[in-house]
Amino acid sequence: MSPETGTLCGSEVLDNPVWSALTGPHRTFAEFGPAGTAARYTLDTSAFSALADPLDPRAWADLAALAGPGQEVWLTGLPTPPPGWRTLMTVAGVQLDGRAVRAGAEPEAVPLGRADVPEMLELVGLTRPGPFLDRTVELGTYLGIRHEGRLVAMAGERMRPAGWSEISAVCTHPDHRGRGLAGRLVRAVAAAARERGDSPFLHAAASNTGAIRLYEAMGFTLRRNPVFLGLRTP
């Protein structure tokens, strides 16, 4: 059975953003279960999987078939796994709507691509903004700021549900914090999304109160409180 692409482009797609992305703009990065009711990003682009309907036991069975027995999967939302699934980690999060953010170009920003991945992985490893893999850079626009040739800050796009773009991998080297680099890059990535006709949004851990305050000062507003759930398949 082929998965069906939804036609919704309002904020309701953010209730199940990974599914909307994988059945829409990011379909080329998707792998589907045999029944077409579960999907995941290719393992070198993102750790996230999704269910067409988190309340449908058949979708959970499809995800188990896709991932294989005893494998780790990550979901976002408010899903309750059926019996046999083991919860490895639960992270309380926030989902922020960026439609009111004042976006704009950043003169110091440079595009980042495949050749920059080693530096990007090094910066992510130092600052730990969230998962970033070998091909994550292919998911959207990534911008960075360099100091004396060294990458010291970056931000980019991860999930792309229909009509939306998730700003992700926002990080600054500890030696260069306090200069507003992260905020400038977030505005620049948001501007790139809007040029394409998308609205920006983002996720953050609820415990990251400093980053959340920064985002709210920029105009992001709380939309919902999802959970990031790490599970092991039966």
Image: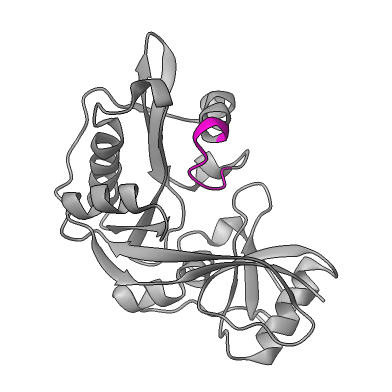
Residue 57 x, y percent position in the rendering: 68, 90
The magenta region covers 125-132
Which of the image's four quarters has the N terminus?
bottom right
Magenta stretch, overall SS: loop
Which of the image's four quarters has the C terminus?
bottom right
Colour scheme of the rendered structure:
one colour
Give above or below for 198 relative to 178: below
* Quadrant housing residue 109: top left
Instruction: Check residue 203 for magenta coloring.
Output: no
Hey, which residue is sitting farthest top in the picture? 148
Q: Is residue 24 left or right of residue 108?
A: right
Residue 51 x, y percent position in the rendering: 59, 78
Residue 123 x, y percent position in the rendering: 51, 29
Please give the name of the residue rendered at 49% of the width and 48% of the height, measured from the top-left corner.
139
Please give the name of the residue rendered at 18% of the width and 45% of the height, measured from the top-left corner.
103
- Residue 176 vs residue 26, the one in the foreground: 176
Q: Is residue 201 left or right of residue 87?
A: left
Give above or below for 170 relative to 146: below
Please give the name of the residue rendered at 52% of the width and 42% of the height, measured from the top-left corner.
138
Please give the name of the residue rendered at 56% of the width and 85% of the height, measured from the top-left corner.
53
Q: Is residue 130 left or right of residue 61?
A: left
Residue 35 seen anywhere in this rendered image of the structure: no
Residue 15 seen anywhere in this rendered image of the structure: yes
- Residue 20 vs residue 219, the one in the foreground: 219
Residue 181 x, y percent position in the rendering: 28, 30
- Residue 153 vs residue 41, the one in the foreground: 153
Q: Is residue 148 left or right of residue 108?
A: right
Instruction: Check residue 131 for magenta coloring.
Output: yes
Give above or below for 145 relative to 135: above
